[in-house]
Amino acid sequence: MRERPPSRRHIEAQRRGRLAETIAAWRLRLAGWRIVARDVRLPAGQIDLIAKRGRVLAFVEVKARAAFDDAAESLHPAQAMRIARAAEQFCAKRPNFAAFERRFDLVLVAPGQWPRHIQDAWHDRR
């Protein structure tokens, strides 16, 4: 059985997501962060951006909506847990990051506004 091709709506959503991730990456770079990885897909889940500054390794979820409040509310606890599990898998495969402080950040993107970087947006509750 052949897979159905993605809909135009799905393709447009992916394009907007990639653009938001690019904007977020530049926002972090301008604040002194180095982007270690983008769009990391692991068995446990997907991580939009992984950035480091000093001895801090930030696993960053990017949320783009029409308003910042809507973007902030779109991160659900189950998604945060998947990102935390994926972060564990990422670090397990890269011992050079073992001594880094790990943090979960959020970058909110809304049209016509400077992206908001929320540091330590949630904690691994496992």
Image (cartoon, rainbow, N blue to C red):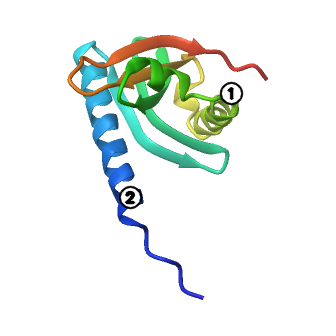
- For residue 26, what is the image quadrant? top left
Between 19 and 74, the one lying in front of the other is 74
Quick one: label 1, few (<14), some, or many (20+) residues within 10 Å? few
Q: Secondary structure at mark 2?
A: helix
Point out the image quarter for the N terminus: bottom right
Between label 1 and label 2, give the one nearer the viewer.
2
Q: Where, by quadrant of the figure, is residue 76 drawn? A: top right
Give the spatial CA distance, label 1 vs label 2. Answer: 26 Å
| Residue 40 screen position, x and y as percent | 48, 44
Identify the element where label 1 is drawn.
Answer: helix
Look at the picture and state if 6 lies above or below 108: below
Residue shown at 40% from the left, 11% from the top: 54
Residue linked to disc 2: 9
Residue 62: x %, y % from top left: 43, 30
Q: Position of residue 90 (x, y in %)?
A: 58, 38
Which residue reaches farthest right? 126
The 10 Å Cα crowd at callout 2, few under 14, some 14 to 19, many 20 or more, is few
Q: Tag on residue 27?
A: none
Q: Residue furthest bottom?
A: 1
Is residue 115 visible in the rendered image? The answer is yes
Q: Is residue 52 visible?
A: no
The quadrant of the picture occupied by the C terminus is: top right
30 or 62: nearer the viewer? 62
- The three-letter amino acid code for the residue at tag 2 is Arg
- Of 37 and 7, nearer the camera is 7
Reading the image, the residue beneath label 1 is 77
Label located before the other in sequence (1 or 2) = 2
Q: Residue at x 26, y 31 (%)?
A: 23
Residue placed at 35% from the left, 15% from the top?
116
Specify whether 36 is left or right of 44.
left
Judge whether 78 appears above or below 16 on screen.
Answer: above
